[in-house]
Amino acid sequence: MSGRILVVDDAAFMRMMLKDILTKNGYEVCGEGANGKEAVAKYEEYKPDLITLDITMPEMDGINALKKIKASDPNAKVIMCSAMGQQTMVIDAIQAGAKDFIVKPFQPDRVIEAIKKAIG
């Protein structure tokens, strides 16, 4: 397994947890961001194979970041991260082009399953 992944979440410990799961499974975390604006900028900069996007973030939320990223790169592979009870937002994200979503607290095997499905 390999793949370069950009991890975006406004909570540093969530990024840490996700990075830990990804690196243990042979993925490379090529960058990270703390809000939607950073997500868009860093996607342009790193051109990762996949980006994980938190839904609720300051400055620009995950849904708007997703739309901007998909507008500049229709082939972008995005997995949304959501807390419990964000069902409507998750549906919005899937309609806007997200490949999948993972729910916090992260379950390592679910994370890896979603990523494998998205980037093979």
Image: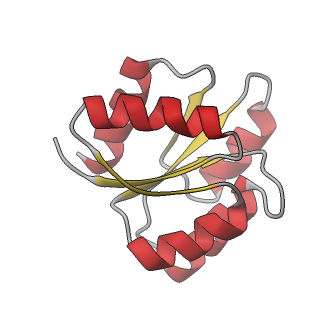
Which residue shows up at 63% across the image and 62% down it? 66
Count the labels in the image.
Answer: 0
118 displayed left or right of 38: left
103 displayed left or right of 88: left
User: In terms of depth relative to the viewer, which is nearer, 72 or 57?
Assistant: 57
Where's the C terminus, which quadrant? top left
User: In terms of depth relative to the viewer, which is nearer, 33 or 62?
Assistant: 33
Q: Position of residue 60 (x, y in %)?
A: 79, 63
User: With respect to residue 110, does 39 lie above or below?
Assistant: below
User: With respect to residue 61, does 84 lie above or below?
Assistant: above
Extreme residue toward the bottom, this view: 72
Which residue shows up at 45% across the image and 78% down it? 45
Which of the colour schemes (rainbow, by chain, secondary structure, one colour) is used?
secondary structure
Q: Position of residue 111 (x, y in %)?
A: 42, 29
User: With respect to residue 11, does 107 lie above or below?
Assistant: above
Which residue shows up at 60% across the image and 71% down it? 40
Extreme residue toward the right, this view: 59
100 displayed left or right of 46: right
Q: Position of residue 42 (x, y in %)?
A: 52, 71
Which residue shows up at 71% across the image and 46% down it? 10
User: With respect to residue 70, does 114 lie above or below?
Assistant: above
Where's the N terminus, which quadrant? top left
Q: Position of residue 89 (x, y in %)?
A: 77, 42
Residue 117 falls in which quadrant of the image?
top left
